[in-house]
Amino acid sequence: MERNEDKQIFQIVSEEAHQLGVRAYIIGGYVRDTLLERPCKDIDIVVEGSGIELAERVAQRLKTKVSVFKRFGTAMLKKWGIEVEFVGARKESYRSDSRNPIVETGTLEEDQKRRDFTINAMSFSLQAEDFGKLIDPFGGEKDLEAKLIRTPLDPDITYSDDPLRMIRAIRFATQLQFTIVPESFEAIQRNADRLHILSKERICDELNKIMKSPKPSYGFQLLYDSGLLEHILPQLCLLKGVETQEGKGHKDNFTHSLQVLDNVAETSDDLWLRWAALLHDIGKPRTKKFEVGIGWTFHSHEFIGAKMIPDLFKQLKLPLNEKMKYVQKLVGLHLRPIALVQDTVTDSAIRRLLFDAGDDIDDLMTLCSADITSKNEMTVRKHKRNFELVRQKLIEVEEKDAIRNFKPPVDGELIMRVFNITPCHAIGTIKEYIKNAILDDGVENSLQATLPLMYKKGEELGLTPILTLDQLLKEFSDN
Ligand code: ATP
Ligand code: MG
């Protein structure tokens, strides 16, 4: 019980519970994180009695509003940026054929039993007589010290009651860098196919938490080893394994993808860049070929992979918005920077990449650098050095030509005005011509340099200007 604000809240809850004649306890994540000395924003209060009634009284004392969820018997209030949730203690069991729990009111101990893990089942008393006392019937504190994830009951019961707990086990193991005890892990393996009764949204939340952890590969490896990944993202499982023909093997693309994910996680907290890292080679199984005399190839796997992204996002219930487009773009472009390593690379190729990546160029470079993995340290170092040269070239060209946020200096409005035309195909043709001249031929990205090109292309297309170049230049210099 660290912060002052928290203490004030607990004091008030304690007093109001006493007034109401009910017993209240802090439970779950707050207790765990306090013992771990980790920051924790949310507070869960469990009440032997009505959680809603207590929440309403506490809210009044704190002069804040309360949201009541009658159907779930819970209530939530916010104060000083802290979320406090109240719930009546309950015992519950899910019938195996249904997602709907049978819920009955219960005691604190019964409520602790239906929690997912021993480390999440501890509580602090809020009764005046033993205020702050740790109530830990399942050895959660010991498990915290030993860094173990263990269920309070027989794991087969805990996991089959709510299969989400299997993913949560892996999520907490990954976030906290804990180990799942063997009997629990074996129970996950046995119950993996129960995942199908869950809503995709609940799974997605947990996956994103695994993704945001310091070393997300740990979680994805556990998902794979437990058999859960097969039910969540079978496309990623297909990357597993090494095939050999004529004595030639390829790398295990699953292990490689996890390595790239961790490499990215070391330099960036961005959830979507991390998703891009995990999925960057997702197109490989579909494009894999053994070519005699050459070996294993994965031609166009970046384009196939990029095409797969919308369906994967839909399947995982990840958002179908600009985040999806961003991941798709990075997957599609992930080989481009590496291709620029050769000395012969032209400024034009660099400008094209800057143009295609736009503001995502830095993230693309992070991904691409993370993609350099090899068992041979020397090889990695050599590639990274070459890669630094590409980075340098990108900076030079960007400074010179400002392509990254490239907006063609000549827009459709201007073309229509000069040639006195309404929207038509010719406008796109002229714009494309100017864009290519800038990207490929190094024409300066300015009005002065590109206006003559507009006239040239327009006239080629049979258009007649009603304003001369001189008139136009004068107009711009007057403004
Ligand atoms: P965080 O909020 O940091 O992710 P947390 O432990 O608070 O961690 P929540 O998902 O907010 O996790 O859940 C709060 C508490 O509710 C947990 O500590 C646990 O006791 C209990 N809990 C949550 N989900 C489940 C579940 N599916 N089965 C059993 N108990 C659960
Ligand atoms: Mg929480």
Image: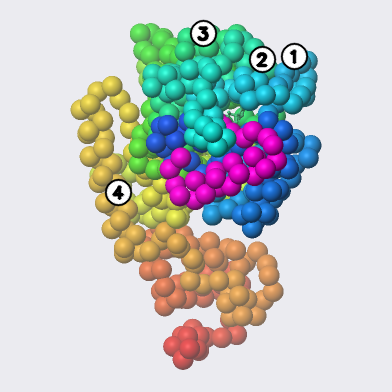
User: Mark 3 is on which residue type?
Assistant: Glu
Q: Which mark is residue 183?
A: 3
> How many labels sit on residues?
4
Image location (x, y in percent) of residue 87: 68, 35
User: Ligand 1 closer than 8 Å to the CB at disc 4?
Assistant: no
The image quadrant that residue 371 belongs to is top left
User: Mark 4 is on which residue type?
Assistant: Arg
Q: Residue furthest front?
A: 129
Type of secondary structure dominating the magenta stretch? helix
Tell me which residue sits at (64%, 40%) in the image.
18
Counting residues from the start of the chain, the first of labels 3 and 4 encountered is 3
Identify the residue position indicated by label 2 in the image: 160
- Residue 289 visible to the viewer: no
Tell me which residue sits at (62%, 35%) in the image.
24
Counting residues from the start of the chain, the first of labels 3 and 2 encountered is 2
The image quadrant that residue 156 belongs to is top right
Image location (x, y in percent) of residue 430: 55, 66
Which region shows up in magenta? 1-29
